[in-house]
Amino acid sequence: MQGIIAALKESSLFCSIDVIELIDEDTIKLLKLKARVTDGTLLYITELHSPSYQKYAYHWQKEGGKVIIRDGTTNLIGKP
């Protein structure tokens, strides 16, 4: 999770990163953040990882709220 935050902070594409929630423990890792892109758009990222479950969601929108793209998935580890 820290790697995602560091990569966004180092990138010249983003002017600010606001971590909304961060849990980094052995059994669960959760990251929710809002990143302001240099063109004024906003990127929301949610990632959740546990030994049996993974979920991610990305939401990119214009400043007024109009969605540019949204993506996400959930995976149960070890399940077909």
Image: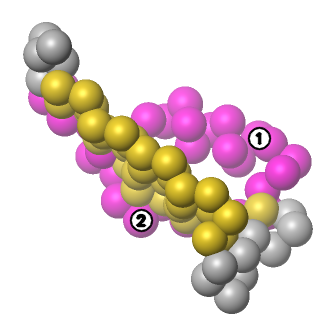
Instruction: Report if residue 51 is visible in the image.
Output: no
Q: Which numbered disc flags the more N-terminal residue, 2 or 1?
A: 1
Of residue 10 and residue 67, the one placed in the foreground of this image is 67
Of residue 1 and residue 78, the one placed in the foreground of this image is 78
Answer above or below: position of 36 versus 62.
above
Indicate the amino acid at tag 1.
Answer: Glu
Outermost bottom residue = 64
Residue on which the image places disc 2: 20
Q: Residue at x 36, y 39 (%)?
A: 73
Residue on which the image places disc 1: 10
Residue 6: image location, x then y, percent: 63, 38
Is residue 16 inside the magenta stretch? Answer: yes
Q: Are there few (<14), some (14-19), or many (20+) residues within 10 Å of tag 1? A: few
Q: Residue at x 49, y 36 (%)?
A: 2
Residue 66: image location, x then y, percent: 65, 79
Q: Residue at x 84, y 51 (%)?
A: 13
Which quadrant holds the N terminus? top left
Indicate the amino acid at tag 2.
Answer: Ile
Q: Which residues are magenta?
A: 1-30
Residue 53: image location, x then y, percent: 18, 30
Number of marks drawn = 2
Residue 65: image location, x then y, percent: 62, 83
